[in-house]
Amino acid sequence: MSQIDIFEAKSSTPEYVAAVNRLLKQLCSSPCEMSAERLQRIVEEHNSRLLLLAVDGEVMGMCTLGFYTSPTGCKAWMEDLVVDETCRGMHLGERLFNFAADFAEHEGYDTLMLTSRPARVAANRMYQKLGLGRKETNVCLKVKSPSQPSPSGRA
């Protein structure tokens, strides 16, 4: 039986960077790569948590939690939930989701939200099985062009 551990990344290590990039290739439909610097930024920010799932010591899944408070409540967003394709069907996505949901609740957040592309059929089936409801909304997106400087000086 495999040893499953889920934990918060507290530092940027070459192992974590490699694992995150391997998982991003499986998650993203367009090329996406994370640097050691960006991973370090995530682990240093108080409103972001990178949760990693390890199978027998090897990182095989991840998700990110982002936290904020608004006039309508304390909210957490879950992003980039992915389990390595070699481990799918082992219910690790459910375990990672439940760990993240419990983590957010323990931190005092009363609403957990996520988005999932319709093409991610298995993931959407899992979310329904876990009791997540759908929110009728439009998601609008504005992405900074590479030539625009960031107002905060962040990359």
Image (spheres, rainbow, N blue to C red):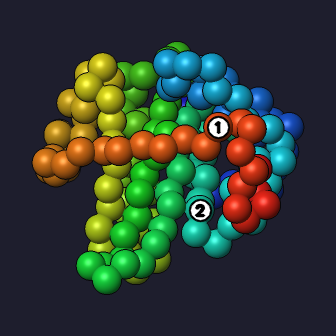
Label ID, residue 51 = none
Q: Quadrant of residue 22 in the image?
A: top right
* Disc 2 to disc 1, C-alpha distance: 23 Å
Q: Residue at x 60, y 28 (%)?
A: 24
Q: In the depicted view, which residue is nearer to us: 68 or 78?
A: 68
Q: Quadrant of residue 129 in the image?
A: top left
Image marks 2 and 1: residues in contact by CB distance under 8 Å: no
Q: Residue at x 58, y 69 (%)?
A: 47
Q: Is residue 120 above or below residue 74?
A: above
Give amino acid for label 1.
Answer: Ser
Crowd band around label 2 with a 10 angstrom C-alpha radius: few (<14), some (14–19), many (20+): some
Q: In the depicted view, which residue is nearer to us: 95 or 120?
A: 120
Relative side of 125 to 151, left or right: left
Label ID, residue 48 = 2
Q: Is residue 35 above or below residue 46?
A: above
Name the residue carrying label 1: 145
Give amino acid for label 2.
Answer: Ser
Q: What percent of the width, then of the height, locates residue 77?
A: 41, 57
Q: In the depicted view, which residue is nearer to us: 66 or 125?
A: 66
